[in-house]
Amino acid sequence: MSQGGEILLEATGVAKTFGGLKAVDDVSFSLRAGIITTLVGPNGAGKTTLFNLMTGHLAPDRGEVTWLGKSILGLPHWKIARLGIGRSFQDLKLFANMTVEENIETFTERGSWLWQSGGASARSARRARVDATLAATGLDDKRDARAVDLAYAERKFLSLARIMASGARLWLLDEPASGLDRGSYERFLSLLRNEVREGVTICIIEHNLDIVQGISDRIAFLDQGRLLAEGDPKTILSDPALAAIYFGERAA
Amino acid sequence: MWAYVVNLAVLISINAILAVTLNFILGYAGIFSIAHALFFGVGAYTATFVAMKLGAGFLSATAAGMALAALISLALALPALRVRGEYFVAASLGLQMLAITVFTEWKSVTGGIGGLTNIPPARILGFEITQPEHFLVLSLICLILIILIIRALVRSSFGRSLKAIRDDETAAWACGKNVAVIKTTAVVVSSALAAVAGSLYAFYLSFINVESFVLETSIQLMAMVIIGGTATLIGPLLGTILILLLPAGLSYLPYLPPTEIGSIQQIAYGLAMVLLMIYRPGGLWGFQEKPKARESGTP
């Protein structure tokens, strides 16, 4: 499996403390282009916090975060999103009262002013992207349904569709496949693989080790806010010490 | 009787402008402003001032009111929208209370408690509007124009941004939206358009005082939007008509003593609100939650 190209997003020595809890403790972690990196670890390991630190949703107490070698610390998270970093959330955060189509369309529109730049040609390009995304995610016949009325798997696909349509170069996905049945989950993975072939880079937080094994090019293992190991899936998954931590038999 | 109907229709169209513009931020962006009556007042006082002191016609007086309302709303929105929703409610309440004091005390401009009288009739392109019927046409044109502007905005990418922020602010940030700029723009647009209602009101009555621009007005406007149905174009119109016709209707009931109409009206409002929350939480025209919609599709 590939170890990826250039480094897109990189955290160096980042730390975040909530009260007395070290949620992320001196973690250095990089995401390389063109591969799927999985972030694994028990609950409370600091995976989502690390995502939040890397996307500007939280400011680290210490450390540096760079995008293509340039510091993005202190940038508001909407500006970081515009650099091409898309993220999904564990609780999906869909626009509940908007239709599926509007949810996706909103992610193609970056402007905050009364109108979008680019005129009619940009508008038709955005429309085309919405249609292509609806088709790719199988949400075509649900385009007019409100997000809140979707079934569980459809909501998961909509969450992914929004990032797809945004044209983000790097996708940070927080447990995107949890709760999916086998069929949906296979469809989900093949969609991700397709996108990686098209040049997208993905980082996934995932608990299900079957999924981790099936999809990862690279795995990073987090526990109690520290990055314990990083490497190819075979090495990480066959490490008995990591397995013991993951399954709750914490070594002394 | 005809004069009464025309008068009611003018007042309904002026209030409808306020309800539609409030709905733009309340319904579509989820911004609860208790200061809408203040922008109504700023529009009224500014238009009056410009018309009386500078002899301006309707269009330039209205434009002056809109500009000042936009500026004041910018001063409110810029700091207040950087924080979460509850703070905006508090800040708008504070500004509304402050405005009442200014409207009451700044006697040289607002006429104090007594207000301003003898406001000249609205003049458009040299034509003076003195007939109530003509004024009704003017206020309906303004209402329709404003509805068209709001309709175009909510159907555009800007409208989608507003709804996105209302539904999930974090996700709106994550898709690259500058939430503070979008919310501020919405408040400024809404306030400037509300000032049009103020200008119409002043020219129509040729008398204004602070009593029309108090907190109760803001709350009544909110009731119009919520009862009619938030985030719809028709809802606020329906709510306005209902709330303004209710006291008129009650006064026609022969067995009600006129002195009690005020309190009966309050009871009717309260009852209507409670029943609405139970049976039609989306408002009369609003979107109704399908039964079981939220339960469907849990894993």
Image (cartoon, grey):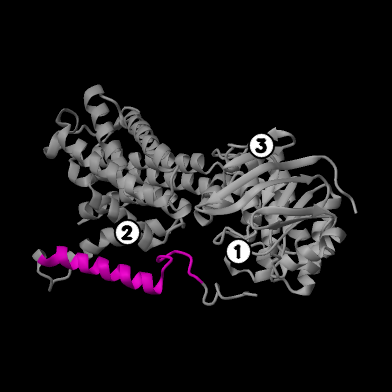
User: Would residue A146 be seen by someone viewing this image from the given angle?
Assistant: no
Same subunit: marks 1 and 3: yes
Mark 1 and mark 3: Cα distance apart in space: 28 Å
Q: Write down the quadrant of residue A45 in the picture.
A: bottom right
Question: Is residue B286 shown in magenta?
Answer: yes
> What residue would you read off at disc 2?
B223
Asked if both marks, 1 and 2, belong to the same chain, the answer given is: no
Residue B143 image point, x, y percent? 39, 46
| Direction right: furthest residue | A1
Q: Amino acid at mark 3?
A: Gly
What residue would you read off at disc 3? A119
Disc 1 vs disc 3: Cβ atoms closer than 8 Å?
A: no
**Which residues fall within the magenta stretch?**
B260-289
Amino acid type, callout 2 = Ala
Q: CA–CA distance between discs 1 and 2?
A: 28 Å
- Badge 1 is on which residue? A147
Is residue B50 something one can see in this rendering?
A: yes
SS state under label 1: helix
